[in-house]
Amino acid sequence: MRRKYTKEDYEFLRKLGHRIRELREQTDLSQAALEIDSKMSKNQIGRIERGEISTSVANLNLMAKALQVDIQSFFDFEE
Amino acid sequence: MRRKYTKEDYEFLRKLGHRIRELREQTDLSQAALEIDSKMSKNQIGRIERGEISTSVANLNLMAKALQVDIQSFFDFEE
DNA sequence: TTTATTCACCACATGTATGTGTTAATTGAT
DNA sequence: ATCAATTAACACATACATGTGGTGAATAAA
């Protein structure tokens, strides 16, 4: 049986999602455009940006390459 | 239907896993000890370190806190 | 040799992330 | 107000990650 996400987990996911959205908007890409570049579904991208789910590191890598940013920049938020 | 992992994906996961193992050993923690601190199963930790699977960012956060390292340091390897 | 530690590896059940398809809702421009 | 672009939000099937429990291999110590 899996661990359940705590409030801290969701707080982390919320901040991460907000940061990803920030970087996507700085690149002037819509979710639909990022879908094409990253090969991820735009639905999934939306869920990640809203902090609803905990995506995998392989997907983080895909998004970083699509946005042409360093994967570490996704974690550039306070705390 | 999900995307399948490419060779680049697995290469990324392999490097990431190696880096995580490196940081764990620097902290002098066994997989069993990290299991306790991170609340993740040691089986899963082993699979991640071997690069077999793509774990979630929430788990990365758990491991970073348990190892008392910055989550960004997980990605400090030559790409 | 024996014992203990650490890790690799396996099978299985289950929860979750993902993609697809669809329909609202929102935003912006005119 | 209308129109277009963008995003939110839903349901569903399925692939994958995760935990549990177990066995075995490798290493070191004694």
Image (cartoon, coloured by chain):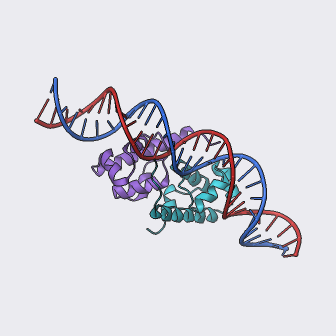
Chain colours: A cyan, B purple, C blue, D red
Q: Is residue A44 left or right of residue B40?
A: right
User: Where residue A69 sits in the image (x, y, percent)?
Assistant: 55, 57
Could you tell whether A48 is left or right of C23 in the image? Answer: left
The answer to whether residue A75 shows anywhere in this view is: yes
State whether residue B5 is above or below residue A60: above
At x 58%, y 55%, the residue is A68
The structure residue drawn at horizontal position 37% and vertical position 44%, both measured from the top left corner, is: B42
Q: Which quadrant: the N terminus of chain B?
A: top right
Residue A34 x/y as whole percent: 66, 55
- Residue A29 in view here: no
Q: How many marks?
A: 0
Task: Say which of D3 and C26 sits in front.
Answer: C26
Query: Could you say where residue B5 lies in the image, as x and y percent from the top left?
Result: 57, 40
Q: Is residue D23 left or right of residue A12?
A: left
D9, C14: nearer the viewer? C14
Q: Position of residue C16 (x, y in %)?
A: 54, 51
Q: Residue at x 62, y 65 (%)?
A: A26
Q: A44 or A20, which lies in front?
A: A44
Horizontal arrangement in the rendering, residue A48 relative to residue A32 (left or right):
left
